[in-house]
Amino acid sequence: MYPVCRNMMDVKKFDGKTVILIGIYHYGTGDGRGKRFRGSMIRMEDNVDVVLSYSPPPEEWKKLDGKKVFAIGCIRKSIPEREACFQRLLLPHLTRIKCLVELEDDIYG
């Protein structure tokens, strides 16, 4: 079983490890500078966003917008340099995502 990650304190604790990330999924939000972010994120309980992707999400992920989800992947305090891209945001990132699923009952409470 993987450790559960719900906030920035957990991100720092489990940096570089595979985790179960829990939060509210959203995509296509503004970045505060008038630009549109087309990727997807999970907002943790402390309102910190974790980037999942910089590309528009697959159709099956779009139906999860605004819902509580869990995702399994490798949590990073910031994106590793070798994975840096043009739109790099200074936010935590979840890489090597194994799944993204709606969380109907919080069994990880």
Image: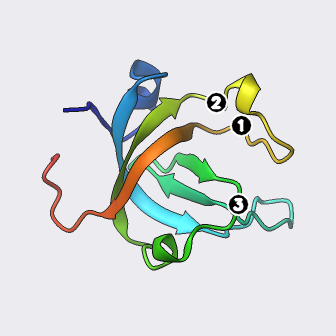
Which three-letter amino acid code belongs to the residue tagged 1?
Leu
Left or right: 78, with 35 as reference point: left
Q: Count the numbered circles shown.
A: 3
Q: Earlier in the sequence, mark 2 or mark 3?
A: 3
Q: Position of residue 12 (x, y in %)?
A: 46, 22
Left or right: 2, with 21 as reference point: left
Relative depth, front residue between 45 and 88: 88
Left or right: 73, with 68 as reference point: right
For the point 79% across and 68% down, the residue is 36
Sort mark 3 into few (<14), some (14-19) or many (20+) by Cα contacts within 10 Å.
Answer: few
For the point 54% across and 46% down, the residue is 50
Sort mark 2 into few (<14), some (14-19) or many (20+) by Cα contacts within 10 Å.
Answer: some
Which structural element holds mark 2?
Answer: loop
In this rendering, the label closer to the viewer, 1 or 3: 3
- Check residue 78 in the rendering and tell me which mark sits there, or answer none: 2
Disc 1: which residue: 90
Which three-letter amino acid code belongs to the residue tagged 2?
Ser
Q: Position of residue 28 (x, y in %)?
A: 67, 70
Disc 3: which residue: 55
For the point 59% across and 48% down, the residue is 51
Q: CA distance from mark 1 to mark 3?
A: 17 Å
Q: Quadrant of residue 37?
A: bottom right
For the point 47% across and 45% down, the residue is 97
Q: Earlier in the sequence, mark 1 or mark 3?
A: 3
Q: Earlier in the sequence, mark 1 or mark 2?
A: 2
Which structural element holds mark 1?
Answer: loop
